[in-house]
Amino acid sequence: MEVLANLEQKNVMHWFEFVCSYPHGSLKEEKLAAAIMDFARSKGLECKEDAWHNVLVRKPASPGYEDKAPVLLQAHIDMIWAKEKGVDFDFETQGLNLYIDGDKVRARGTTLGADDGIGAAFMLAVLDDDTLEHPPIEAVFTTAEEIGMVGAIHFDKSQLTAKRMINFDAGGFTEGRIYVGCAGIMRAMIRQQAERVPFSPAGHQPVQIVVGGLKGGHPGGDVGKGRGNATQMMGRILRQLLAMEGVEVSHAESADFSQDNKYSMPIDARILACAKDAAAVTAAMASLQATLRDELSDVDEGVTITVTQTGEVPAQVLSRSTVETMTRIVALLPNGVQSMQRLFPDTPECSATACRVEWEGDTVIYYSSIRSCKDSLLTEMGVKYQTIAALNGCEAELSDPLPGWDYDKNSHIRQLVEAEYVREFGREPRFKVTHAGTECSQFKKDLPDLDIISMGPIIYEEHTPKEYLGIESVGVLWTFLKNILRQL
Ligand SMILES: [Zn+2]
């Protein structure tokens, strides 16, 4: 029994329910991919599935559109699996329990996967509806986007002939948000060889210093908010400890200890030290906490630095020069917005986040995440990390950048969408360049001439069990999409 069958927006919602009826977590998309293949075959459409379960379906032009350049429609079919505590639900085997809540579709106790199941639903609706007018269509359903765009990276783009692309992995179309660019991402690692020296305590007490209470956030979406960074705080604490008499440091690390992700915003730090005057350390940290709360008032004033006496005095501590090098590296690590976009003033053009600092044996590793829509700025930022490393006798390692999708001021599809938006809604859309990474850049990298736009209906709270899809916005975008396809 279809839950969404009676909605006015049923031509798209039927296909959303179809998507939701199959398990489709990242790297668990094979059942849904097979169902899409079966549907395409039943419609007599040319279709192909690759080893990553990416699916390509071609639909011929409608009569009169045979000479038009093909258009690529694209969405990812994997979703984040998250459920509320205590909910008995098996994502591996069950379809989602959809329900209607006013103007929203939700899934009972779980993520909805409207990110980006609704994108796939729009594409399936286009493939299914033989009354539409459109150029030849190449529909690409990608996999494993949520774990690093794995499907899009591996998909063979040389088989595509499209010159224009509509990506559906975006929210907020009816609120005017339409995307015309995204950030590229590079990762940097600096490795420092640490030195330990024997320690003979002379009345030292072991103490543990812990930084907590920070909000954290997403290195893309939250980078401009000025929130506290535990790695930077760790560096400041080490500098203070170095300046004090009779203090030795045996360990220092930072991370978001609640997750494995090495490139999340660090909100926790832990420093182990031995002090002749533990009370002086406690006083210094209380003073630093007050300074930080003042600096971070209104954004992250809940920051705490706590000092506790711990059990054992270690037999070795870090050499003074090791701790000095740590403070220099942390002080130099870029953190925050590096430059803003001129055309899109509320969006960073380039940013960096000092991420986790962790240990592998006697090696300290400093992780950083760098974002920019301009690949050349990623390259420039890479030079900074290499320089920081070289100045401190360390090594830097840079990842191959995930490319950015830069704003194209001559984009024909953007101009078309803008004119249609004004015609239909009587107001200008707010074009945006997101500071997140998207699959669009993977297609742009291999097909540089591709003219891209990215839009999707109202989706909020994605990646959480509170996720919902705005019902009315689906119908509005469907009407709009049909009008755009007709003009391509
Ligand atoms: Zn998505």
Image (cartoon, rainbow, N blue to C red):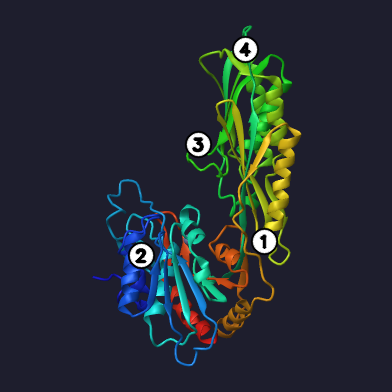
How far is mark 2 from mark 4, CA to CA? Answer: 60 Å
Identity of the residue drawn at 54% across and 73% down:
165
Count of marks overlaid on the render:
4
In the rendered image, which quarter contains the N terminus?
A: bottom left
| Mark 1 and mark 2 residues within 8 Å of each other at the beta carbon | no
> Residue tagged by mark 1?
346
Amino acid type for the residue under numbered disc 2: Ala
> Residue tagged by mark 3?
257
Q: Is residue 358 visible?
A: yes
Task: Give the foreground label among 3 and 1.
Answer: 3
Identity of the residue drawn at 38% across and 86% down:
130
Mark 1 or mark 4, which has the lower sequence index?
A: 4
Q: In the rendered view, would you say 399 is above or below 348?
A: above
Coordinates of residue 215 in the picture (x, y in percent): 56, 44
Outermost residue on the top side: it is: 202
Q: In this view, does 71 lie to the left or right of 124?
A: right
Q: Is residue 339 left or right of residue 66?
A: right
Mark 3 or mark 1, which has the lower sequence index?
A: 3
Mark 2 or mark 4, which has the lower sequence index?
A: 2
Coordinates of residue 433 in the picture (x, y in percent): 62, 64
Around disc 1, counting alpha carbons within 10 Å, would you say few (fewer than 14), some (14 to 19), or many (20 or more)? few
How far is mark 3 from mark 1, CA to CA? Answer: 31 Å
Residue 33: mark in rendering: 2
Q: Is mark 3 on a helix, strand or loop?
A: loop
> Residue tagged by mark 4?
198
How far is mark 1 from mark 2, CA to CA? Answer: 38 Å
| Mark 3 and mark 1 residues within 8 Å of each other at the beta carbon | no
Residue in the foreground of this view, choosing between 384 and 423: 384
Identity of the residue drawn at 41% across and 56% down:
466
Q: In the rendered view, would you say 374 is above or below 239?
A: below
Q: In the rendered view, would you say 56 is above or below 250?
A: below
